[in-house]
Image (spheres, rainbow, N blue to C red):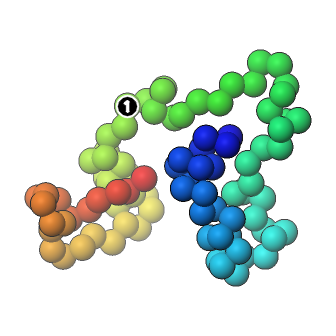
Amino acid sequence: MNYMREIYLEGGLDKVLRESGVPERERYFFDFPREEELSVDGLLIAHWSYFENWDPYRNYLVAREFCGLQEAQAGNEGTFTNFAQND
């Protein structure tokens, strides 16, 4: 969890949550498991991409069809697409 916190979130999760205005009681979705929760035998942490290939174009199609993605009118610099970073 520390690796995820420091590398993926660049140590800024707490700052973002603090400045977001989201009440602390509603931040449970963003909380990492506590150390005692991680010590359960058989618990493994994995990335979704371990099970399914990352496909930005497919993600774009899903976001457009099911999530209301609004596309940019112009393409992104350095690419022919009008979408990017659609995690």
Q: Quadrant of residue 33?
A: top right
Disc 1 residue type? Asn
Judging depth in this view, the residue of 39 and 83 nearest the camera is 39
Question: Which residue: 73% across, 48% down?
Answer: 32
Q: Quadrant of residue 80?
A: bottom left
Tell me residue 84's x, y (percent): 29, 59
Tell me residue 36's x, y (percent): 88, 35
Q: Is 11 situated left or right of 67 in this image?
A: right
Q: Is 72 situated left or right of 20 in this image?
A: left
Q: Which residue is mark 1?
A: 53
Question: Which residue: 36% across, 49% down?
Answer: 59
Question: Which residue: 66% across, 79% down?
Answer: 19
Which quadrant would the N terminus be assigned to in this image? top right
Tell me residue 54's x, y (percent): 37, 37
Question: Which residue: 31% across, 52% down?
Answer: 61
In the rendered image, the vertical position of residue 82 relative to residue 74, given as above or below: above
In the rendered image, the vertical position of residue 25 relative to residue 60, given as above or below: below
Mark 1, secondary structure of its residue: loop
